[in-house]
Image (cartoon, rainbow, N blue to C red):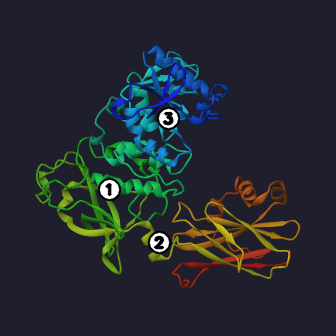
């Protein structure tokens, strides 16, 4: 662990039980932050970011500490191994600190000012992903405003903090995190964001006592990996009780935002200290395991909605745990409801199921427990379902240009981090990565000296769609490159509007387009063909 000497700002490394007592800084990143190289090279005092370090070190000395830790300059971020080790150790470092100083740069008021509550609870610090563990882990947290005036502690402000974050006050007072379900912990992060997509997962590892390698570039897969690790180590079925307002086959959530409903309905969470599943309750049922086929689990199932192959699966109960095995008569239960999800059996594989209707969970009276039966099943991963359905599988799209003149061309594809345009031997757009959050894209078409078009494309509910829009001449001329042109256009039109209009077929257009599925290539890649027809303007 690398620490700053609070008296001279020199860095020193410590190992194991040689680490001295230290204070730690929590803040939100801004411009001109001081890196390790800046501090070692003597360039730090010239930057605005150094003020936070000076405040932290000055307070450390006032509180009787010689050493401090600040994330901006105590980690060599140019060293990927060190960065990964630091991220995996971060929760422990905050937990082991003597005091955590929270610097709220956007709060100017003092604790006795009339606007203090609004200023404090409205701080950007409460919206960032990394600051969640920085709030929970340290035993002592002190808050400072923009001028480094102390405005309270985690203990004195716990009611306001709880109201803002949804975190129970007893958690803020150091309660054992293992007493809280996975769904509840993930709900604490449901309104938080990070600059890098992967960091929303990496910032949560400490809350679950999980370590995993950093793979920047994997995008939303990081949160999938985190959930798989939670399943492997915690046997907590509340993690499957997420909800999402969009079609989302699969048993794992896409982001912590899918647990936001628990902020509004905390009564649907497993009670503190309750075993949030049916295992270890004299049932002899094995815990769930993650496999390449999906989640292997033995769940309580019963038929649902009088629809063939459709079932309800019990995840956990609300209320007190049963005092007898769950095979006993319903009268032995004191819980009020069973929390269930709707699943559907694969027509070709009786053991494989897919989650349906992810926009909600179902509450079933506990008195109906006798209608459920233990059943071993596999819950499909989203990508397995998508391949089987032929939906959301846009991996390579062949492009056809009927009626194109020599001057007509495809200038580029958007977004560049999702799609790549290949021009030889024929036009193809290809998605090199795994299933992303969205597969919507757009092609920028150039026809003659002043005409630009966007051809939107994507998948919706398993079906391909596309629509054509002409870009106003002023928008195209005021921007440079596909990315800028599309972004300028989307600020007023929006990709979502294009999706909602996907069934509209214009009768007269200079460009028309149709996206259809074609036979799979020899390598098994699902391919589609986007046929565009050009007519004189």
Which of the marked residues, 1 or 3, is nearer the chain's N terminus? 3
Identify the residue at horizontal 22%, vertical 68% (top origin). 375
Residue designated by label 2: 386
Q: Earlier in the sequence, mark 2 or mark 3?
A: 3
Q: Residue 261 location in percent, x, y?
A: 41, 48
Can you say whether 234 is above or below 536 in the image? above
Residue 61 percent coordinates (x, y) = 47, 16
Quarter of the figure that contains the N terminus: top left
Circles 2 and 1 in contact, beta carbons < 8 Å: no
Q: Secondary structure at mark 1?
A: helix
Q: Which label lies toward us, 1 or 3?
A: 1
Q: Tell me if mark 2 has few (under 14), some (14-19) or many (20+) residues whose alpha carbon lies within 10 angstroms of its own.
A: some
For residue 126, the mark is 3
131 vs 504, left or right, is left
Image coordinates for residue 67, horizontal then vertical, percent: 45, 24
Q: Which mark is residue 231?
A: 1
């Amino acid at each position: 662990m690398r620490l700053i000497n609070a008296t001279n700002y020199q860095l020193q490394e410590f190992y194991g039980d040689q680490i001295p007592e230290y204070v730690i800084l929590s803040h939100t990143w801004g411009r001109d932050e001081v890196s390790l190289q800046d501090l070692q090279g003597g360039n730090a005092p010239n930057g605005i970011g150094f003020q936070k370090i000076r405040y932290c070190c000055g307070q450390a000395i006032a509180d009787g500490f010689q050493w401090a830790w600040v994330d901006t300059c105590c980690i060599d971020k140019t060293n990927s191994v060190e960065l990964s080790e630091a991220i995996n150790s971060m929760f422990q470092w905050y937990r082991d600190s003597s005091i955590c100083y929270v610097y709220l740069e956007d709060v100017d008021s003092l604790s006795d000012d009339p606007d203090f509550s609004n200023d404090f609870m409205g701080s950007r610090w409460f919206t960032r992903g990394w600051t969640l563990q920085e709030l929970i882990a340290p035993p002592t947290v002190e808050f400072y405003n923009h001028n480094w005036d102390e405005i309270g502690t985690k203990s004195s402000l716990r009611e306001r903090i709880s109201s803002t974050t949804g975190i129970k006050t007893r958690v803020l007072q150091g309660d054992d995190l293992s007493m809280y379900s996975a769904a509840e912990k993930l709900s604490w992060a449901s309104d938080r964001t990070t600059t890098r997509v992967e960091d929303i997962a990496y910032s949560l590892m400490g809350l679950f006592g999980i370590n995993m390698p950093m793979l920047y570039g994997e995008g939303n897969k990081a949160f999938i990996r985190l959930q798989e690790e939670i399943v492997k180590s915690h046997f907590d079925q509340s993690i499957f009780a997420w909800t999402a307002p969009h079609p989302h086959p699969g048993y794992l959530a896409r982001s912590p935002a899918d647990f936001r409903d628990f902020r509004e309905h905390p009564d649907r969470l497993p009670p503190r200290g309750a075993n949030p599943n049916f295992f270890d309750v004299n049932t002899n049922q094995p815990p769930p395991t993650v496999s390449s086929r999906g989640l292997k689990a033995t769940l309580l199932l019963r038929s649902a909605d009088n629809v063939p192959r459709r079932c309800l699966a019990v995840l956990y109960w609300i209320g007190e745990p049963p005092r007898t095995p769950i095979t006993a008569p319903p009268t032995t239960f004191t819980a009020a409801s069973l929390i269930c999800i709707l699943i559907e059996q694969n027509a070709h594989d009786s053991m494989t199921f897919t989650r349906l209707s992810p926009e909600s969970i179902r509450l079933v009276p506990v008195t109906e427990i006798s209608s459920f039966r233990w059943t071993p099943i596999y819950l499909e991963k989203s990508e397995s379902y998508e391949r089987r359905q032929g939906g959301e599988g846009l991996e390579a799209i062949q492009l056809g240009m009927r009626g194109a003149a020599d001057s007509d061309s495809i200038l580029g594809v958007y977004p560049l981090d999702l799609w790549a345009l290949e021009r030889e031997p024929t036009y193809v757009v290809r998605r090199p990565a795994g299933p992303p959050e969205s597969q919507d894209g757009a092609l920028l078409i150039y026809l003659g000296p002043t005409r630009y078009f966007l051809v939107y494309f994507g998948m919706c509910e398993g079906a391909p769609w596309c629509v054509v829009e002409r870009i106003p001449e002023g928008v195209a001329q005021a921007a440079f490159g596909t990315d800028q042109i599309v972004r300028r256009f989307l600020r007023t039109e929006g990709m979502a509007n294009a999706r909602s209009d996907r069934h509209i077929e214009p009768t007269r257009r200079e460009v028309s387009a149709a996206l259809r599925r074609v036979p799979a290539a020899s390598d098994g890649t699902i391919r589609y063909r986007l046929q565009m027809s050009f007519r004189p303007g």
